[in-house]
Amino acid sequence: MTDFFGKRVSGPFTIPSGIITTNTRTMKRVANDIPQVGVITTKSIGPENKPGNKEPILHCVEPGKPGTFVNAVGLRNPGADNFAEQLSDLELPGNRFLLASVFGAIPEDMEYIVERLDPYVDGFELNFSCPHSPGHGASIGHNPDSVYKFTKAARRKTDKPILSKFSANMSGSNNSILSAMRGGSDGITAINTLGPLHHYLFDDCNMPVLYNIQGSFSGEKIRKTGIKFVKRVRELIGSDALIIGMGGITCAYDIDKYREAGADFFGIGTVLAGMTTRQMMRYMAALERDMETGDYEAKEYIWYNKSGHKNFRVSNKERLADDLCILTLDDYFDLEPGQFVFAYLPKVYDVGGESRPGEKPFSLIENDPATLVVHRRGSFSGALTELDEGDRLYLRGPCGDPVDLNSVEYGFCVAGGTGAAALYPIARALDRQDKFVSFLFGGRDEQQIAYADDRDFSQRVFLTLTTDDGSRGERGFVTDYIEREIRRAVSDETVVNVDDLTFFNCGPAPMIEVAEGIEGRYALGENIWSSMEYLTRCGYGLCGECARDDGLRSCVDGPFLNPYHMRQLEMPL
Ligand SMILES: Cc1cc2nc3c(=O)[nH]c(=O)nc-3n(C[C@H](O)[C@H](O)[C@H](O)COP(=O)(O)O)c2cc1C
């Protein structure tokens, strides 16, 4: 137990604002599972809902190293009223300190937000440091007078502890820090990301990698600057005020350096990229032990992003319907069944006459050559359907946790619409292991399932096609045929015991709900795997957006998830 502003908390770490604990689902998950995180810091909350930037919002700058990232999320948040409502239902263990990160454009914003959130939180962190959000964050932090006014405004509305968060790239930051303390701050959080900078990804097209064009660094690359800055802050504010130090911490040695510089608590952020929830639990526990022993056990759990973007050309385009096409690319992409990729295009959006990049997650129906099924839904998928043979397309990944097929006796795949793309590699891999597979694939009409054939299946794969309008295969929903197919498998003796069935579902949420309900009558929960469409934005597990209600993040813990994941989290580390 450690003391944080007089509250006994379970551990010396926080996950910095904007990383993983960006909503109440992940806040709860982290608070319940990771005692080392004694301080739960929220996403920065403003006066109103702010949708933030489109994807790409985050990019790994140095693949192969344990993570330097450049990001521009754009202070995406639900707004103070909505967030207060969410917090009113949130229960956290008593030994966690709930720190609300807040930002505003004028001091009155600060008053409003602090007043709204005050009943539900233990303290506040004023964001004077977000580097790429004009009118907020660092643009206020640069000006000592403004910092004083904003801190004073927050102080008027709360008696709880206030930290002010600064970034190391601020000119005149000494005066700003002192102004924050004079205005009523009880301590300082340092540092925020370093930037802004223009970060260019591709030499050949020289286009920015982030939608926002400007982004800023977090992770390894900013550690030295962070440590130096914390030292300066400690000298400025004296020994009594509290400092949360962060920026590129990866191991206990880094924590020691921050502690020597003057930090009391430690933010562990970007290093968590790519870790599943279970890995994050192990990492944090090891990190705390390493602080005692001086070991480097925690480093074992760090994820090394092996690849950056891979550059392809479209070698074949097959248009199946007005809003549906198949793009075959000119090379393979290395990924395992259950994993997915992000497709990136450098020019998707037109913002004031300037073209901006876009990126979205996709399953590959084949990986050699890489093949995508594209259903036009918005601007990005629209731009993909406009590609012609010979055009460039970039993929990054693989993302997500592969499904474990070794223990599967009989695979039962239920696909709705483009969800089938994720299930074909699973079915094919099982087929190659000489296992029987039932493959049920349903769509709106015959065009939507036009790519169902010819996917290299052997006689061991039993294909059932359904369409809502009966234009091909059976008429009705794909879920209407699950029980019939189970009975067929039993009577043909392709499955001896119904318990041997392992279900894989992929499609829209309502389809999955119905499928799981039926399958649950035959199989144990741990044999039902579903990939639902969640809003996966970063693919590294950092932005927290794709969390399910239980706080598991689909992009690292999934995308195929089942109740067994929850039990695994309850098992001893
Ligand atoms: C994806 C992402 C989103 C972030 N969002 C915020 C934010 O909303 N508010 C804030 O004060 N800092 C934000 N930050 C900065 C972090 O809180 C932290 O200060 C910084 O990443 C340095 O720590 P790290 O190197 O361990 O990640 C964000 C950082 C990242 C990578």
Image (cartoon, rainbow, N blue to C red):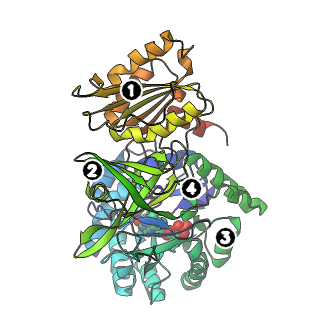
Q: Secondary structure at mark 1?
A: helix
Q: Earlier in the sequence, mark 2 or mark 4?
A: 4
Estimate how packed mark 4 is, as few (under 14), some (14 to 19) or many (20 or more) residues with alpha carbons within 10 Å: many
Q: Are marks 3 and 1 in contact (CB under 8 Å)?
A: no
Q: Secondary structure at mark 4?
A: strand
Residue 167 coordinates in the image, percent (x, y): 47, 78
Q: Which mark is residue 38?
A: 4
Label 3 and label 2: CA atoms lie apart by 46 Å
Nearer the viewer's eye, disc 3 or disc 1? 1
Residue appearing at x 58%, y 62% in the figure = 271
Q: Are marks 4 and 1 in contact (CB under 8 Å)?
A: no
Q: Is mark 1 within 8 Å of ligand 1?
A: no
Q: Which residue is mark 2?
A: 376
- In-front residue for pair 460/562: 460
Amino acid type at mark 2: Arg
Label 4 and label 1: CA atoms lie apart by 39 Å
Q: Residue furthest bottom?
A: 172
Q: Are marks 1 and 2 in contact (CB under 8 Å)?
A: no
In the image: residue 475, left or right of residue 96: left
Q: Secondary structure at mark 3?
A: helix
Amino acid type at mark 4: Gly
Q: Earlier in the sequence, mark 3 or mark 1?
A: 3
Q: Earlier in the sequence, mark 1 or mark 2?
A: 2
Q: Which residue is mark 3?
A: 254
Amino acid type at mark 3: Asp
Residue 364 coordinates in the image, percent (x, y): 45, 47
Q: Which mark is residue 515?
A: 1
Label 2 and label 4: CA atoms lie apart by 44 Å
Nearer the viewer's eye, disc 4 or disc 1? 1
Q: Is mark 4 within 8 Å of ligand 1?
A: no
